[in-house]
Image (spheres, helix red, strand yellow):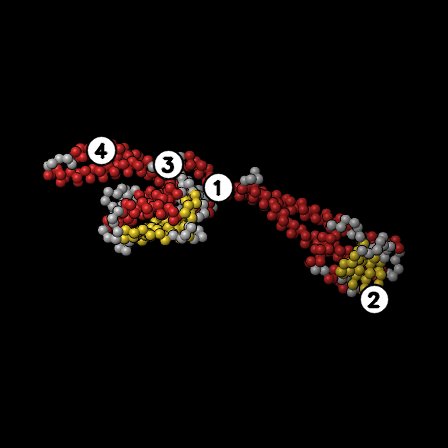
Amino acid sequence: MFNTLSGRFLILTTVFVMLAEVLIFVPSVARFREDYLKTRLERAQIASLVLLADDIIAPDLEAELLENAEVYNVVLRRDEVRELMLSSPLPETVDRTYDLRQSTPYTSIRDAMLRLFTPEPEVIRVIGDPVREGGLVIEITMMTGKLRAAMLEYGLNIFYLSAVISVVTAGLLFLAVRSLMVRPIKRVIDNMKDYAADPEDARRIMQPSTNVTELREAEQALRSLQTELTGALKQKERLAQLGGAVARISHDLRNILTTAQLFADRMETSQDPTVKRVGPKLVNSIHRAVSLCENTLTFGKAEEPAPSLNWITLVDLTGDIFDSERLSAGDHDISFAEDIPAGLTLRADPEQLYRVLSNLVRNARQAIEASGKPGEVAVQATETDTDWQIRVVDTGPGLPQRTKDHLFQPFAGTNRKGGSGLGLAIAAELVRGHGGTLKLERSGPDGTAFLMTLPKEIDHEA
């Protein structure tokens, strides 16, 4: 019970109420002590009036007056004269003197707590102002035993009252919190569990019902999230079914086209002028169709593994890519440049990062080759406190707007003849697997730049 929200709220409420009662208890006991001493002064003054009325009283009467006032001696100062009005033998010497005329809240609380935690009785002298101007100063001597007992009794009464108030208050707050907060929250949790069992069932979507503004906003946000997720799952299911159909069609079509390609290859040996002219075009068309089918099947089956992060030197990785691309460039006037700080290392999957950079560099090289002009492909790298930034920049002709609009979409983001449009889609997926981003930074007549950002910190909550 105490691990639940309502149980902990019950404990905290009880503790806070008791703390408030303690803050009330201390000054209350101090006030009670001061009133008790003032009452003894008033009783002693009343007892001394008997002596003022009759200068001589019997010892038995004097003893009875002192006993009723619960004091040993009464001294009254009148007209600058200090008179011992009533007296009896003291059991011991006076231990402390308290002047109520100079009492402050601090001294009153201090003296009260000192008396409460001093169990041994003491003889004290108390000085105060007489009531109704019955003199200048009145002094009494008294034992502290009855004073402390009265203070303890008063304190216990406050404690019992505080305990009752705490229990009642905590109970009422417990019931209120359980009704207004815990039950609605538990209802949201139960709905989340029920929805997780079958997220495609629209009947399990949260229906807001609470009147508490904050909780209702949470229920509405959950309902909106569940509605979007259910729609996305249904769409994903339809896309998966469509993808399966496309894969089956591509498989069968590839077989058909492969057969057609075999016949087309034989046409190349024909001596007929028309066949010689049309044959190569037909072969190229069939080859592109076969390649598209194979790429479609490959993309549909691909399940990229999670990256295996290791520390790698970026210059070495880039050098391997450039060596391969220089061979592919052949006689084309294309240069490759590195702008990477010496010794820069980063944490990534070497194989996957190679695939991403190789794809970007190859696309840049092919764009420059297609333009028929000289150009340069450069890999630049910078490092910040939070991430590594890698740019692949070229001086090619730039990307057309149609390609920019669908750049990272499979089968759509390509402007190269015979391209499948899967390279950038796969590259972006690999970068996302590292927790990073891949985006087109700029593209125009002066060239194109892609920016890849890899975070340094690993997000364990993702």
User: Does residue 447 lie above or below 197 as drawn?
Assistant: below
Number of the front mark, 4 or 2: 4
Q: Residue at x 23, y 39 (%)?
A: 288
Mark yes or no: residue 408 visible: no
Numbered badge on residue 185: 1
432 with respect to 149 (left or right): left
Position of the C terminus by quadrant: top left
User: Does residue 205 lie above or below 27 as drawn?
Assistant: above
Tag 1: amino acid: Ile
User: Does residue 455 lie above or below 285 as drawn?
Assistant: below
Q: Earlier in the sequence, mark 4 or mark 2?
A: 2
CB-based contact (under 8 Å), mark 3 and mark 4 = no
Quarter of image, res 127: bottom right
Q: Earlier in the sequence, mark 3 or mark 4?
A: 3
- Rendering coords of residue 272 (x, y %): 10, 36
Q: Earlier in the sequence, mark 1 or mark 4?
A: 1
Q: Residue at x 79, y 50 (%)?
A: 121
Tag 3: amino acid: Glu
Residue that badge 3 annotates? 200
Tag 4: amino acid: Thr
Q: Earlier in the sequence, mark 2 or mark 3?
A: 2
